[in-house]
Amino acid sequence: MNGTGHPSYPRRRYPLPILALVLALVLTLSWAVVSYAGRAGGWKATEFQVQNMDNETANFTAHFYRPDGSEALSFTDNIPPGRSVYYRPETDLGLPVDFTGTLRLESEQNIVGTIIHFAAQMDDFNGNDVFEMVPDDTTARTYFAPLIERNHGGSSSKILVGNLGPAPAAATIFIYNPDGTLASTRVLGPIPENGSASLNLKKVGNLGDQFIGSARIEADQPIWVDIVQVSSDRWAVYPATPTGDVELYAPVAADGVIPTIRVQNVSDIATTVWVCSAADCEDPVDLPPWGSRRIMPTHSWKNYYTITSPGGGPIAAVVSISDTVGASVYTALSWDQASTCQATPMLFDDYDDWDTTLWMYNPNADPVTVTVSFVGTSPLDSSAEIVQIAPGGTQSLGPDDVDVGTNYVAQISADQPVFALVTGTASDEDDGRFVYRATGFPSCPSTPIPTLTEWGYIVLAAFIVLVAAWTLRRRSLVEPVR
């Protein structure tokens, strides 16, 4: 059923978020969960890529921590400005084959990272997904998970908690029924410093089968939380959100596929939620305090969705896709996550049959001009695209649209704040799909990433210099005629 139109509510404006991993000369840490990495007898399970968004070479140290907080491996490396490095920890770094835990990066420069986990080769279920690495100054003590399940349609959730604090942490997980009533409470901890813990909802028996609801996670110091959705043939990951908002954005997840949106009321005040596409709005949904609701839009996904709570309390939401190809889930974005500079630290073109597509959404009332620089691990592998995006419009760039190879990254520079995310799909239907959100920065580096044309000029200039030097040297060896 369709609604009659968009609700009337004031458009909220926020200052741009300071999401850079570091300020100048200040040490900042980013991290992400690494799940089932290199399990004994398995093929490559985890790979990760690190992108330098600074004007100078980024020196960094990587630490792999076990759940008990002990360090399994550490190494140092550096990345030239605007470039990236890509690792297969089990083969490139010698990470123990039975490792499972977290990865933490330390750098004094602006870096961003992404981890991809290959589950199809490791477990009885199929699918792959991406863990988004986050700066430690964006972690929090409270998180919300709009979608958790126990044997619901064959799918169950794992709540992964990582401790970034200087001391052991305790986390309390409040599990809510869709009507907002408390279904169960569980405590994780003490979680050691740099350690991690998880709650498998399959083991929370008092929830019963076919449970679907939401969760609130409270800790006594800053933590990070990921939610893993696992079924017999699907795997999907989304980061829990530390805040709610009254206006959320779902830029895109898969062209032409209708998504499922799960909305959670993250306050003790009842609210009404509207889900609107470019075409129309769905009928409004009433949410009780701490309640949640699944919304199945009736409009085909051609552009974007907004999820709003006008006049009510803040909400959180996740957007999921599940079809014959696979499943993916991501957390809806708030205006604070729009930025004039975005980084996507993992792009593929026919990498183990995987392709990625970059999606950009313009939430502004005016057209936006976006420059996208694609850079490979080699400095000569680069290209650039300039696109115009209409107000409320979406632009996608896939392997057929740009000259990219494997293990690429992108720097997205816009004259107004935009949203960006990346979807990945394998040609083999058994391998599924994934989606991750780009990381925003206050501004892009002043040192531009060279395009193919610019690299041509650079190479030509270098050739001219070499020829000139050779000519001068040759002349100096010839005795002058008197």
Image: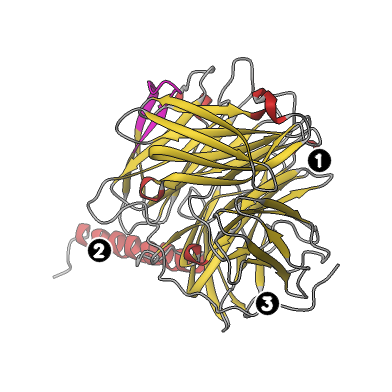
Q: Is residue 434 above or below residue 453?
A: above
The residue sitting at 84% across, 44% down in the picture is 324
- Quarter of the image that includes the C terminus: bottom left
Instruction: Single out the mark in the foreground, 3 or 2.
Output: 3
- Determine crowd level at label 3: few under 14, some 14-19, many 20+ residues with C-alpha closer than 10 A: some
Q: Is residue 331 above or below residue 448?
A: above
Badge 2 vs badge 1, beta-carbon distance below 8 Å: no
Kindly identify the amino acid type of the residue bearing the numbered disc 3. Answer: Pro
The residue sitting at 24% across, 50% down in the picture is 26
Instruction: Single out the mark in the foreground, 3 or 1.
Output: 3
Q: Secondary structure at mark 3?
A: loop
User: Of marks 3 and 1, which one's residue comes earlier in the chain?
Assistant: 3
Can you give x and y, in whole percent of width and height, for residue 394 in the image?
A: 66, 70
Circle 2 sits on which residue?
472
Q: Residue farthest to the left?
A: 482
Mark identifier at residue 398:
none
- Determine crowd level at label 2: few under 14, some 14-19, many 20+ residues with C-alpha closer than 10 A: few
* Mark 2 to mark 1 CA distance (whole Å): 61 Å
Circle 3 sits on which residue?
7
In this picture the colour scheme is secondary structure
- Determine crowd level at label 1: few under 14, some 14-19, many 20+ residues with C-alpha closer than 10 A: some
Foreground of the two, 29 or 137: 137
Which residue range is magenta in the image? 61-75
Mark identifier at residue 429:
1
* Mark 3 to mark 2 CA distance (whole Å): 74 Å
Can you give x and y, in whole percent of width and height, for residue 194 in the image?
A: 38, 30
User: Of marks 3 and 2, which one's residue comes earlier in the chain?
Assistant: 3
Q: Is 45 on the left or on the right of 150, as rendered? A: left
The residue sitting at 26% across, 46% down in the picture is 27
